[in-house]
Amino acid sequence: MDLRQAVAITAVAIAPFASAQEADNWKGETELGVLITSGTTEETNIKGRLGLVHEVETWRNTGEFRTNYSETEDETTAEKYQAALETDYKFAENQYWFLRGSYEDDRFSGYDFESTVTTGYGNRVWNSGDRSFLDLSVGAGYRYNKLDMVNAEGEDTEEEAIARLAGQFDYALSENSLFRQKLSTEVGLDENNTVTESETSLQANVVGNLSMKAAFRVKHVSDAPAGSENTDTETSLSLLYGF
């Protein structure tokens, strides 16, 4: 994939917000970060994200789509696409039952793709105003990953039941700034392969619905495919538009 393709995919991922703005009960945010350096080293980094939330009295539906592309000296060094969808049935004021699906295609992870489906119980254990809350959830499900190459057992897939623990903490530091911490871990119940992801971010309003966002993401795979790193990190600075 070249730079033009990466830009096109990012634009397609972000485009739906234009029509979503007029829909009732919808809100979301789009994010774009681009860094291009030249001189001694030529490097291009592109990060795109679309997050959507649709909420009514008894249901909350969320979707998140991400793309990340990096190129150094005309050589691709990172290429990743992620999608996660979740629907929550709110059976009590702060309690809900969730169903979640995720998909990830990371060219440099050792996997052709990674996918999970989980369901379980969630609780908004703390809430203050519209922008500050703490959500905790626990559930179980299934993991299906396709490897780039066969493993030592001669298999090219990983399949197992998993347990999932997750939390999200949003805290409004002021009317114009927000701190957010996301953390999740998925533990394999057969092979004990554990995947843990964390994102710490801080965003501050610039003007209107436009904000600056700084974020640090970590993904750790306890039993990564041969030739792949167990831990990936990502530091980013991007523009965020809320609607």
Image (cartoon, rainbow, N blue to C red):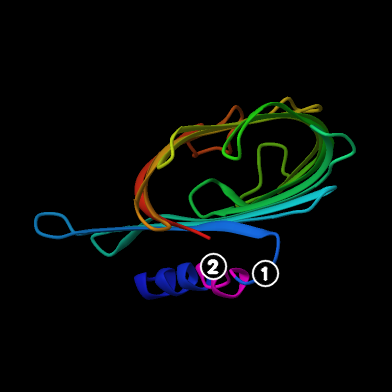
Residue 216, visible in the rendered structure: no
Q: Main secondary structure of the magenta part?
A: helix
Q: Where is residue 113 in the image (x, y as percent from the top left)?
A: 64, 53
Circle on res. 23: 1
Q: How crowded is mark 1: few (under 14 residues within 10 Å), some or many (20 or more)?
A: few
Circle on res. 13: 2
Residue furthest toward the right?
A: 91
State the image quarter where residue 137 is shown.
top right
Identify the magenta region. 13-21
Residue 140, visible in the rendered structure: yes
Q: Residues within 10 Å of mark 2 (few under 14, many from 20)?
A: some
Q: In this view, does 33 lie above or below 157?
A: below
Judge whether residue 17 is colored magenta.
Answer: yes
In three-dimensional space, the C-alpha distance between marks 1 and 2, rounded to whole angstroms, equals 18 Å
Q: What residue appears at the point 60 percent right and 40 percent down from the top-left corner?
A: 130
Q: What residue appears at the point 62 percent right and 72 percent down from the top-left corner?
A: 22
Q: What residue appears at the point 57 percent right and 38 percent down from the top-left corner?
A: 131
Q: Position of residue 230 (x, y in %)?
A: 51, 31
Q: Is residue 23 above or below residue 119?
A: below
Tag 1, which secondary structure? Answer: loop
Quadrant of the snapshot with the N terminus: bottom left
Judge whether residue 16 is colored magenta.
Answer: yes
Amino acid type of the residue that numbered disc 2 sits on in the rendered structure = Ala
Q: What residue appears at the point 58 percent right and 69 percent down from the top-left corner?
A: 21
Dot 1 or dot 2: first in sequence order is 2
